[in-house]
Amino acid sequence: ANRVFQRLGLLRQATRDVIEGSFTSLPEDDLHLDEITDLIHAFNKMIRGIDTKQEQLLQSRKLASIGTFSSGIAHELNIPLNNISLTADTLQEEEETLTPAERREMVADIIHETERASKIVRNLLDFSRERTTRNELVDLRELIKKTVALIQNQLTLNYVWVEDYIPADLPPVPGDGHNLQQVFLNLFLNSLQAMDEGGLIHLEGAVDQKGYVRIEVNDTGRGIPPEQLARIFDPFFTTKPVGQGTGLGLSIAYGIVKKHGGYIEVRSKV
């Protein structure tokens, strides 16, 4: 009886963990084959299925994020491509009048701009590529810089600037860098969409009293009404107009943070 109640207690706690976004399998006791063992097997099978669906949802959200800031990416790619085109046209039209030194300088410019465009594409592919989850020490300061760079043109086009006060000596955290990048990308895109006429994203970082590495993302957006604050991490809940939001960004961010053993909070005023 004690064994049954103990395993039922584990199942009850594991179910609560699932609600909190932590998908951890239970130890399977094949020495005592009974209905509780079957239930644990079924629970673990469900957990594996949820974990797989979560990864698929995360990947689809990545692709949706790319669509959101695609105009910024197109603008960022157009700059080096236009420079290459203009330099190549000049080289072709004025080839006979150019000195060898001028030709070498123009070819060097074309190579530089090509590498610039290539880097943009590589960063985009690196972000969008589906990867297996991996655990590593993540430098959140560098990861956030990389995420800001990914949407820099979108920030510029929307007259939004970023103030980064994350200290250089912030300790690394264990986790999956690509999944954590998705968290910050979702937060930054939410901030962008909340600032119709430009504004500021203010970033801070510290180690709190409990030993957590804490990152604060603040913006000067329109704010969230008090009655909606309790629901913003719910799947499919969105304050955006129809067709402008799926309501999955913050729920995915919540799930990723909980899976990393952390927590995410919101404060806002209209």
Image (tube, helix red, strand yellow):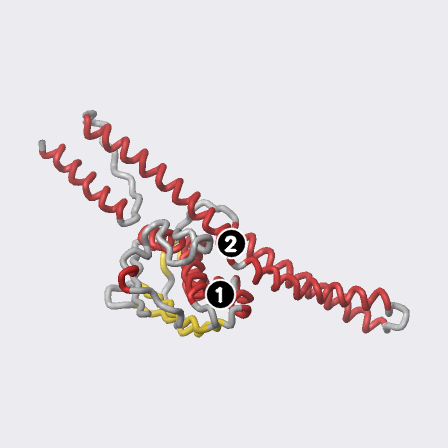
Q: How far is disc 1 from disc 2 in space, using C-alphas? A: 13 Å
Residue found 23% across the figure and 31% down from its top: 39
Camera-side residue of 178 and 15: 15
Position of residue 117 in the picture relative to residue 219 (left or right): right
Is residue 269 visible in the rendered image? The answer is yes
N-term mark: 1 or 2: 2
Query: 238 above or below 46?
Result: below
The answer to whether 102 appears left or right of 66 in the picture is right
Quarter of the image holding residue 12?
Answer: top left
The x, y position of residue 76, in whole percent, is 61, 64
Across and down, in percent, residue 105 comes to 77, 71
Labelled disc at residue 220: none
10 Å neighbourhood of mark 2: few (<14), some, or many (≥20)? many
Q: Secondary structure at mark 2?
A: helix
Work out whether residue 152 or residue 226 is closer to the camera in this orientation and state it: 226
So how many labels did they put on this image?
2
Q: Residue at x 46, y 47 (%)?
A: 59
Residue 211 placed where, x, y %? Answer: 27, 64
Amino acid type assigned to the residue bearing label 2 in the image: Phe
Name the amino acid type tagged 1: Val
Name the outermost residue toward the right. Answer: 96
Query: Which image quarter holds the N terminus?
Result: top left
In-image side of 103 versus 59 (left or right): right
Q: What residue appears at the point 36 percent right and 69 percent down from the top-left corner?
A: 205
Residue highlighted by disc 2: 127
The residue under label 1 is: 148
Side (left or right) of 3 relative to 206:
left
Residue 169 visible in the current orientation? no
Q: Residue visible at 36% across and 37% down?
A: 49
Instruction: Looking at the picture, tell me which residue is in the foreground, 70 or 94.
Output: 70
The answer to whether residue 266 is above or below residue 126 is below
Q: Circle 1 — which element?
A: helix
